[in-house]
Image: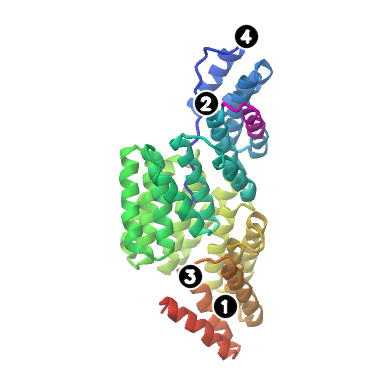
Amino acid sequence: MRTVIALALFLYPLAGFADGDWPASHQKGKQAFSHSDYSGAASTFEFCWPLARTALEQAITANDLGLSLHALGRELEARGWLGRAYDLWAAMPSRALDLAETALGLVNVSRALGDFSGAEQILRRILAMPFDDAEHRAALLNTLGDMLREQERNSEADGQFREAIALKGISRERQLEATLGLADLARKAGNRAESEMLWNRAALLARETRSIKLEAVALRGLGLTRSDGGDYPTAESLLRRSLAMLEPYAGEDPEQVASALGCLAGLYRRQKKLSLAEDALLRAIELDKRNAGEEHPQTALLRELLAELYSAEKRFDDAGENAAKAYVSMRKSFGENSTAAAAALATAALVNYRQKRLETAAEQYSSALSTIRANNAAMNDATAEIASHYAAVLAALHRNAEARRIQAELKSFGWK
């Protein structure tokens, strides 16, 4: 579940720019963008580029063209233009805040392309710069926290969100982003009471800021937390409400609709409503494939859920194919030794376990847990479930001493 900070074009007054056709042409591009005519905006900004006479005009044009292309899903082109804007701002020491704005756009494009390492480097570089604007710093911290949370680097993410929310004078929007991140981290850690409190606070902030999409994200998180606690009727009501709020935005923000469908599919899976779960997952995967691409981590997460579902139905060929694709995507985006890749490998292990390929499953579970431990990931419900399955595989292979060690670890965690 991702919360993407909304980006807007630079709203510079026309005064102070060089004479010529650039100011009026750029204004036309801004108007097109404000009316969601991203194709028209991109064409206008492309026309503006050769008209830009100063480095300032060039930086603004490159940034706004990059954001327009990003809105159109033309991410490689968007990255090129935003990178050009970034370099132009970096050569102007007095424009640190403008550099931060473009950096946020460049990070969102890099994430869309699955380049999480590059996105993190950009954010950390900007955050190391001395600028006093709390609002921009909070936006950067929240974006970094959201990205770290997506990679299961939860303790690092927690620090970013807490640093952001402690800043004085930040807007409700920045408070909302940090609260959403902290709520999801509390849910992942099994702190359901704290998580519910934070989701409810986020929903209130979203209503105060009239952000329908982020209120839907908060309700989705609350639904997931209720599902984790076994309150399936309430969870289903909340998740359906969240999806209904997001569906009108499917054209401009398909990723959030796909995420809502994925969460609803997970609930259906817990309720043994397998046909409904499969339908929701297939629809979500199709949305993410069109929006982010076949190999994007968001698509991979949904494929992991689909692999688990198919393996429960003994459709092992389909399960293995989806698990393999998810693992390849996670390794490519985050690295072979990442927690995200380890979780995908554990999904492949589950498929093999259910197919009675016990030796292969044991090897995969062992590798996945070793990676998770090496990354100092906290023992949460997801990790405990992986360990529980591994213990069952070891017991089936009569490797009883190893199985008992895993079971003792689970008992110390409180896993039943």
Q: Looking at the picture, which amino acid does disc 1 mark?
A: Arg
The kind of residue on which mark 4 rests is Gly
- The residue tagged 4 is 20
Local SS, label 2: loop
Residue 144, image x, y percentages: 52, 47
The residue to which callout 3 is attached is 379
Quarter occupied by residue 176: top left
In the displayed structure, does residue 412 sit left or right of residue 49?
left
Q: Which mark is residue 10?
A: 2
- Residue at (44%, 37%) from the top-left corner? 134
- Residue 69: image quadrant is top right
Residue type at the position of mark 3:
Met
Circle nearer the N terminus (2, 3): 2
**Mark 4 Cα shell of 10 Å, populated few (<14), some (14-19), many (≥20):** few
Disc nearest the viewer among 1 and 3: 3
* Residues drawn in magenta: 81-94
SS class of the residue under badge 4? loop
Name the quadrant of the C terminus: bottom left
User: How far is mark 3 from mark 4, CA to CA?
Assistant: 62 Å
